Image: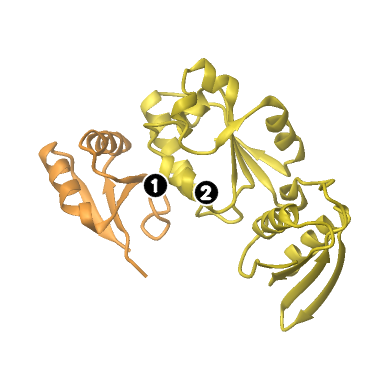
Amino acid sequence: MTRKHYFLFNSTQDAIKSESICREAKIPVTVVPVPRELSSECGIAMESGPEVLSAVKEALNRNHIPFRHTEI
Amino acid sequence: MKATVNAKGQKCPVPLIMTRDALSKAEPGDTLIIEIDNPTSRQNVERFLKDNNASVSVSEKEGLFVLTAVKMEENLKRPDAEAYCPTSHVVLFRNNLMGTGPEELGAILMQAFVNTLSKVEPIPSALLFYNNGIHLAVEGSPVLPALQELEKKGVSLLVCGTCLDYFKSKGRLRAGRVSNMYEILEKLTLAGHVIEP
């Protein structure tokens, strides 16, 4: 099975900002609930394919948004 | 003519939709062989076939049900196959935001909602879009890939034509098809239950 990449954030505001940054930069990401394996709390995460990982990381770093990248 | 419907591994309402499509294409006198591997779908599909005046016989072998049906009449009396699925539910989008509150929060929640729809079993039989909800199905919507995936799985996506017209978005529809009040009301009436994000 292919592994999926998730970006987790400190706040919902950061998740909203990150989605909008990726959308403007035309980086394809999918907004999803934080997977149950990662947290039982309600949260928003971004899922991405491996081919855009570095683009996402770079865009978030450039905008000083702290995130945690994980794969499951 | 003989046609085979392989609905193995499919959950309600997919076997019903596959059967309906095959039965619609068949001519009177044609035989359909429908293979199903769960007893609930077998019952639903059998009921659907009988209500549409097809003759049905069923055999079972090691958990696999084979329904042999002969089409008797040209037109289907009860074409709404999804209604035969007891868990059949529809999702109603009357807005492009989830819940009431700040727009940016409603928008991100809606994306997460739509992107999760195909991951939670059973999947809905139909998605209905009207008023601001239609923006989810038109060009530029961030949830188009998820909607198109649901469509591929056999979910009907019905989008209010009046609303597309009002928003001058008719040429920008990218998921689902243009529908009308009759069809939307019919889906709501026949739904087991309705979910509104």
Where A51 sits versus B184, above or below?
A: below
User: Which residue is pictured at 54% across the width and 54% down the height?
Assistant: B120
Residue under mark 1: which chain is it in? A
Query: In this view of the protein, which residue sits in the foreground, A30 or B64?
Result: B64
Q: Is residue A17 left or right of residue B90?
A: left
Is the C terminus of chain B in the top left, top right, bottom left or bottom right quadrant? Answer: top right
| Residue behind mark 2 | B150
Cα gap from disc 2 to disc 1, whole angstroms: 16 Å
Q: Looking at the picture, how far across and down is residue A62, in whole percent?
A: 10, 39
Dot 2: within a 10 Å radius of its alpha carbon, few (fewer than 14), some, or many (20 or more) residues?
many
The extreme top residue here reads: B166
Q: Looking at the picture, how far across and down is residue B27, in whole percent?
A: 78, 56
Which chain is assigned orange?
Answer: A
User: Which residue is pictured at 21% across the width and 47% down the height?
Assistant: A67
Chain B on-screen colour:
yellow
| Residue behind mark 1 | A32
Classify mark 1: helix, strand or loop. strand
